[in-house]
Image (cartoon, helix red, strand yellow):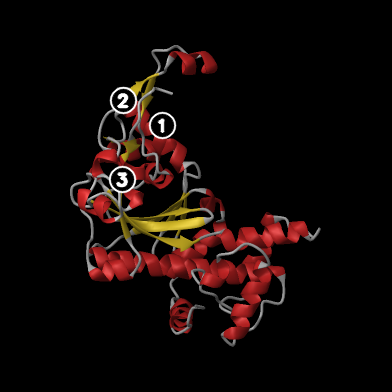
Amino acid sequence: MTGQQGAELTNASTTGLLDAGTGAWSAELATAVGLAPGALPPLWRPGDLIGTLTPDAAARTGLDATVPVLAVGSHDTASAVVGVPAEGERFAYISCGTWSLVGLELDAPVRTAASHRAGFTNEAGVDGTVRYLRNVMGLWLLQECLRGWQEQGEPAELGELLAAAAREPGFVSLVDPDDAAFLPPGDMPGRIAAFCRRTGQPVPASRPALVRCILESLALAHARAVEQAQELAGRSVEVVHVVGGGARNELLCRLTADACGLPVVAGPVEATALGNALVQARALGTLHGTLTDLRALLRAHTAPRVHLPGTDRSGWDAARRRLSGVPSLP
């Protein structure tokens, strides 16, 4: 669009080739994997002006050639975190869709052996922040069940299914969403049933029971990642923000609040698009201020739903103990 070539920082950080301390390309890492450090492109930061439209791009789009093209948090999670309507620093976020990205926004990376073993990454965020997070399997399990039923000619209406799942008894069967068995597509109900048989649990006897199993298991995985992030980063949180498509799933958000023992603020669904727009508007001078100021604007113009945790944690504690000793498939 501009004729310029470069790499935006938040996306570049996911390559593993940046120095987590300086935010610049690491010549040592590049050399170690056989790349010439000089071949790596210049880095843009969110809000940087990349350039204006080339004549060809202007002709194709019908826009004026003076239209500026700006860098944003081009990793979708980086923009989504900007779009979290948090107040203060003591929050965790879950960018929830097919995957759940669970983490904290920090000022500095956490570079400990324990953090590495737990699978957390230090990815660049907007305004020099660090997205300290780990990937958790998200709504993939539910999406694959729905897709499979659709292909079998037996589609399910999601709203009705979730309402029925909410009436199912809790903690009957649980799975580890991060088990390697659940990564491939195809016959997700069958693989969940196999996990339950392998671990001596009842196989869900109905679709609502299966959905209840999936969502309780995801809530437990969310809680485990939030707890690990706090312990490894040495920061306690007071609220969990769920953004992205998963924010629409009221049952999952309520179960996540119960599993975490913390309030869950659900929404906005389009946090990525909002974060993108906020960074562009600030770069153009339409908006001003820090991430705190941008998020205050979001809170004033969005209406997220708040889910408060229940007071009885005995069921969740017992469920956590049940899953803690379950071996993963190789």
Quarter of the image where one finds residue 279: top left
The x and y percentages for residue 158 are 68, 56
Assess disc 2: are there few (<14), some (14-19) or many (≥20) residues with their C-alpha within 10 Å of its C-alpha. some
* Residue behind mark 1: 277
Q: Residue furthest left?
A: 22
Q: Residue at x 40, y 70 (%)?
A: 224
Q: CA distance from mark 1 to mark 3?
A: 15 Å
Marked residue nearer the N-terminal end (1 or 2): 2
Q: Indicate left or right for 208 with 224 as reference.
A: right
Q: Residue at x 23, y 60 (%)?
A: 110
The x and y percentages for residue 164 are 68, 65
Q: CA distance from mark 2 to mark 3?
A: 17 Å
Q: Residue at x 26, y 56 (%)?
A: 32
- In the rendered structure, are the residues bearing label 1 and label 3 in contact, judged by CB atoms less than 8 Å apart? no
Marked residue nearer the N-terminal end (1 or 3): 3
Is the residue 128 above or below the residue 151 in the image? above
Circle 1 or circle 2, nearest the eye: 2
> For numbered disc 2, what is the local secondary structure?
strand
Marked residue nearer the N-terminal end (2 or 3): 2
Q: Residue at x 56, y 72 (%)?
A: 181
| Image quarter in which the N terminus is found | top left
Amino acid type of the residue tagged 3 in the rendering: Gly
Q: Indicate left or right for 258 with 46 as reference.
A: right
Quarter of the image where one finds residue 226: bottom left
Q: CA distance from mark 1 to mark 2?
A: 14 Å
Q: Which mark is residue 87?
A: none
Assess disc 3: are there few (<14), some (14-19) or many (≥20) residues with their C-alpha within 10 Å of its C-alpha. many
* Residue behind mark 3: 125
* Residue behind mark 2: 49
